[in-house]
Amino acid sequence: MHRVDLRGAYAEMGRQQGLILRESGFDLPSPDPKILHFARHCQELVARSLYLVVGFPCRIRTKVAF
């Protein structure tokens, strides 16, 4: 039985679980370029929509290189 220990921010939890998966030999395939293009477009739309909600420009920070 695998026990999941969830502590910290979302990024830290994801990093912890990712390291466990990597150590066990699990590997994800490379993302399709169409998916990366879609993700970039979504990121731009969210940034524009967020401006309408909060009233000032927001920069969405991510460590994922799209």
Image (cartoon, grey):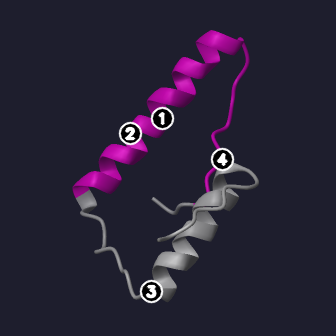
Query: Do the numbered discs 3 and 1 sit on residues whose CB atoms are within 8 Å?
Result: no
**Residue located 50% across and 28% down the image:** 46
15, above or below 58, in the image: below
Between disc 2 and disc 3, whose residue precedes?
A: 3
Mark 3 in CB contact with mark 4 (< 8 angstroms): no
Q: Pointer 4: what residue?
A: 61
The span from disc 4 to disc 1 (Cα, nearest Å) is 12 Å
Residue 12 appears left or right of 46 = right
Main SS class of the magenta portion in the image: helix
The stretch drawn in magenta includes residue 58: yes
Q: Earlier in the sequence, mark 3 or mark 1?
A: 3
The residue identified by callout 2 is: 41
Mark 1 = which residue? Answer: 44
Point out residue 1 in the picture as x, y percentages from the top left corner. 47, 71
Judged by depth in the image, the label closer to the viewer, 2 or 3, is 3
**Residue 58 at what x, y percent from top left?**
69, 30
